[in-house]
Amino acid sequence: MLRIKILQLIIFVALSISASSFASTTTWSGDSGNNLWCDKHNWTSDLPSYNDSVRIPHQATIRVTDGCETYSKSLLLGTDTYPGTSYLVVEKGAVLNIKDYFHIGHDIETSGTDRAGVVIVNGGIINIEIDSRVGNGGYGTLYMLDGEINILGQWGAPRQPYSSGYTYLHGGTIKADSMYMRSGADEGGFYNGIGRLEITEGKLLLENAEGQYNILSALAKGWITGYGSSDNIVIASEIVNGTNYTSVTAQEPKIDPLVVAIIGDPQLGMSQNTQDYVNTAMQDTNNIDHNFIAILGDLAQNNQSYYSDYKESVIDQAFKPVYSLAGNGDLNAGLSSYLETTNLPLYYSIYQSGIRFIFLSTVATSGKYSHICHLDPEQLSWLSSELDSDNYSTTVIFSHAPIFETTWHSEERDYMDSPGSMYLKESTELRRLFYSHPNVKIYAHGHLHHSAGLIDKNGRGDCYLEANVLHISVGATANNQGSTFMIIDQDKITVKKRDHQNEMWLEAGKYQYSSSPNTLIAN
């Protein structure tokens, strides 16, 4: 019996020595300078095989490209220099086969410096037979854009104390037996790791029956989010190749459009019917869902006494906030009375749902009939600075007069009878600002007093698209010409004309301005 046990021990030791003699460690050198995994000259020995533990400790960007199928016993991705990061990109048509485990952001050296690893899967496939950890003593990030990650064991983010593991599942599928997530100071304050999973268009599949429990637990703690919120996560049961999985996906949240009711020239006191027209417009507007009202100047007809009528018909009736600017009629009535009535400055900006709205006022006039409207150098300087302060947010500019030669009858007309020329004096300066600030999308104005759908002899009408800016002319409420509603979605701006008297939308003057997806309205 003793001889048998000794013989078994000898055989075990011999097998262990034999197995260890075949196992090796291969390290990335990058000597070829082309960043390609499948170039053997980028490794300290030959291309890695199933017997090789692969280490990528250097600051490197490695590409596994179309047609490259790789093999390794294990793969540790990190860096031994501070604050460097190693990148591994698995492209479409590439396959990465790992026999044991794959750790992203691995503590390769124990010197206490940062170890960071980033993996980008963009159409390729990664097959892992044991487990994968995003953050294993270091800082790990996984960007899943397209493709597959198939893990026979556990997927975790992160696994070790003081690690960070961020996974961004924006496409493709991560499939694993089970999931492990930790975050925060658990285990008596020892852990202090950070684990996060953000899902948009991708999918996580877990086979183990405990998968749903782990998912719900991570959701409750805010570690898993979809489009920025755990409320958008969808958990379901899914059968894949005859195997039942718990699937985790994200449902894109519906963002309500931003609706602006734009009223042009209420001009109280203009005629005996004006106040009735304005009251009708306000009553109809209150029945339409909107976020705020923009009044494009000429609140009163050349006399401060009419501001009490404006307050009664507009401000007191409005269900939503009212913002306004001064027109030439307000200039004639007295800007001090305008300021006192509206409690608003002459020029300013507001933000609504990530959209910037800028209001500009008329502070002087010129022309044969005093209908060419002016800003002034101070206001123009403020506008330039305001636009420079935010080159990203979609911007809408409201003013009283049109930019020269854009919408209906915005050309030179002082050779004709009254009202003559009706445009903004600083049109050239504003065009330059529009050109240098492509986030300006809309310039809306009143002043012209025309019904929806009219086209002048130059072919100009309600809307005019010039470069990146859509110019919108809004009819005068004082003349019962309706108003304009602007509906801003994530990918388009819709302009609609409203007949308040008949409580109906008009086909005339309707316009849709498309933009790239998710560039307009914000959450």
Image: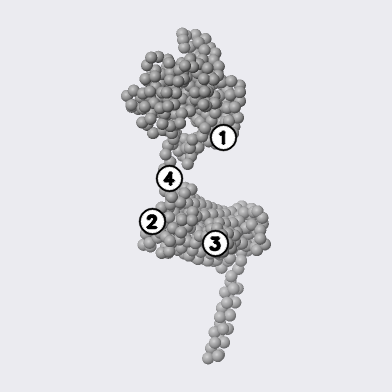
Badge 1 density bin: few <14, some 14–19, many ≥20, Cα 10 Å:
some
Q: Secondary structure at mark 1?
A: loop
Identify the mark nearer the N-term, 1 or 4: 4
Which disc number belongs to residue 253?
4
Which is nearer the eye, 459 or 325? 325
Identify the mark nearer the N-term, 2 or 4: 2
Amino acid type, mark 2: Ala
Q: CA distance from mark 1 to mark 4?
A: 26 Å
Above/below status of 400 relative to 107? above
Instruction: Kindly check if marks 4 and 3 are in contact, taking CB atoms under 8 A apart as contact.
Output: no
Badge 3 density bin: few <14, some 14–19, many ≥20, Cα 10 Å:
few
Q: Position of residue 327 (x, y in %)?
A: 50, 19
Image point (59%, 27%), residue name? 382
Above/below status of 381 relative to 252? above
Q: Secondary structure at mark 3?
A: loop
Q: CA distance from mark 2 to mark 3?
A: 29 Å
Instruction: Kindly check if marks 2 and 3 are in contact, taking CB atoms under 8 A apart as contact.
Output: no
Amino acid type, mark 3: Asp
Which disc number belongs to residue 186?
3
Which disc number belongs to residue 391?
1
* Count of marks, rendered view: 4
Q: CA distance from mark 4 to mark 3?
A: 32 Å
Image point (49%, 54%), residue name? 222
Image point (58%, 65%), residue name? 53
Identify the mark nearer the N-term, 4 or 3: 3
What residue is shown with label 2? 236
Above/below status of 21 relative to 59? below
Using the rendered image of the protein, determine whether residue 304 is visible from the camera's viewpoint: yes
Q: Position of residue 508 (x, y in %)?
A: 37, 24
Image point (57%, 34%), residue name? 390
